[in-house]
Amino acid sequence: MAQHLNRMLPAAFVVVWSSGYLAGTIGAHSGPPLALLFWRFLLAFAVLCVLAVVTRAPWPTRPRTYLHLLVTGFLLQTVQFGPLYIGLSMGVTAGMAAMIMSACPLVVAAVAVPLLGERMTAWQWMGLTTGLAGVVISLSDKLNGGGSLAGYALAGLALLGFAAGTLYQKRFGGSVDLRTGTTVQLVAGMITTLPLAALHGGVLLPMTAPAIGATVWLALVNSIGGFTMLFLLLRLRSGGAATSVLYLVPPVTALLALVVLGQTIPVTVFVGMAVSGAGVLMTVLTTRTPSGKRLLSVFRLRRSGVALDSTAR
């Protein structure tokens, strides 16, 4: 069962993470983008907080652990999604946003090796580069369209927030319970997004089906489901290997856009998907696969709060 979960987790993560770009595009064009972000965080926080209380999830016991979680939440939630949603509202397409964000594995690997002492083989570096090349091929026919320069600059800022937050989570959040840890991170997202939303379009969300539907999807599926899977991948693999599956997000986003938004799919998407898939395999297959005991220990919900945050210093 553990090995089956290990095989299914990356595929499920790619589909869930890809859906977020479509929902974000719909939501960002249905109302103020930062209002969408604030209500996404608020709804996800409410649901996850209730879940943590009902299931008696252990909360961190050290103040420093809460500080680390708040910093991670600010980077992964506010710095990543704030600029990204504004960029989407300025015309950056979901596919282009996904392509820019998919550079995260290379950024994470380049920093994690010297900073966290992670080891990457030459074959894995080739895999990361091949995966990024596949992303460019997938969206090569769209490189000239949609979005302003400012929108692309904001997407670049979102990439930096995503990479920095991923590295911070890898370094300080690996031992915290996922339910309570993500809840605290969402608090950071809410607190820092609220004043920004008030200054950029207001905090009121239009009572329309696209706006409400996008908010609910992003909160439940992406903020809770997507980040839970991302953090599990980070606990099972190195930073570069764990995030290498992001190379599959842009082509999968293009496939989902065909169904959800009615967009056409050029042949380059399928070619790029094959190249990206080869790059991911080169990166992941040279990484030691966690044993069944190791995988189950990651999924197991421990009862001791001290044990859970003992390494988050």
Image (cartoon, grey):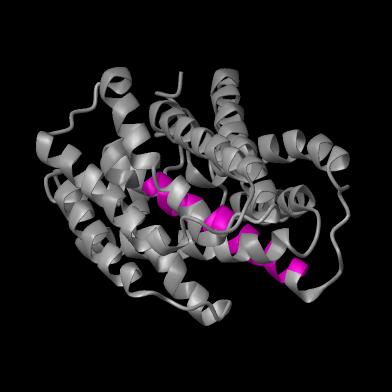
Q: Is residue 170 above or below residue 190?
A: above
Residue at x-position 74% and y-position 72%: 210
Q: Tell me the magenta residue range.
A: 211-232
Percent from the top left, x then y, of residue 66? 59, 26
Q: Nearer the viewer, residue 162 or 168?
A: 162
Quadrant of the rendered image containing residue 310: top left
Residue at x-position 61% and y-position 42%: 149
Left or right of residue 310: residue 22: right
Image quadrant in which the N terminus is located: bottom left
Left or right of residue 145: residue 53: right
Say if residue 297 shows up in the picture.
yes
Percent from the top left, x then y, of residue 194? 80, 39
Residue at x-position 73% and y-position 62%: 29
Residue at x-position 55% and y-position 81%: 262
> Does the magenta-highlighted stretch encompass residue 2?
no
Say if residue 14 shows up in the picture.
no
Percent from the top left, x then y, of residue 220? 61, 62
Q: Nearer the viewer, residue 198 or 190?
A: 198
Quadrant of the rendered image containing residue 152: top right
Left or right of residue 196: residue 301: left
Q: Main secondary structure of the magenta part?
A: helix
Q: Is residue 247 above or below residue 237?
A: below
Percent from the top left, x then y, of residue 104? 40, 40
> Does the magenta-highlighted stretch encompass residue 220?
yes
Quadrant of the rendered image containing residue 271: bottom left
Left or right of residue 178: residue 202: right
Q: Is residue 184 above or below residue 44?
A: above
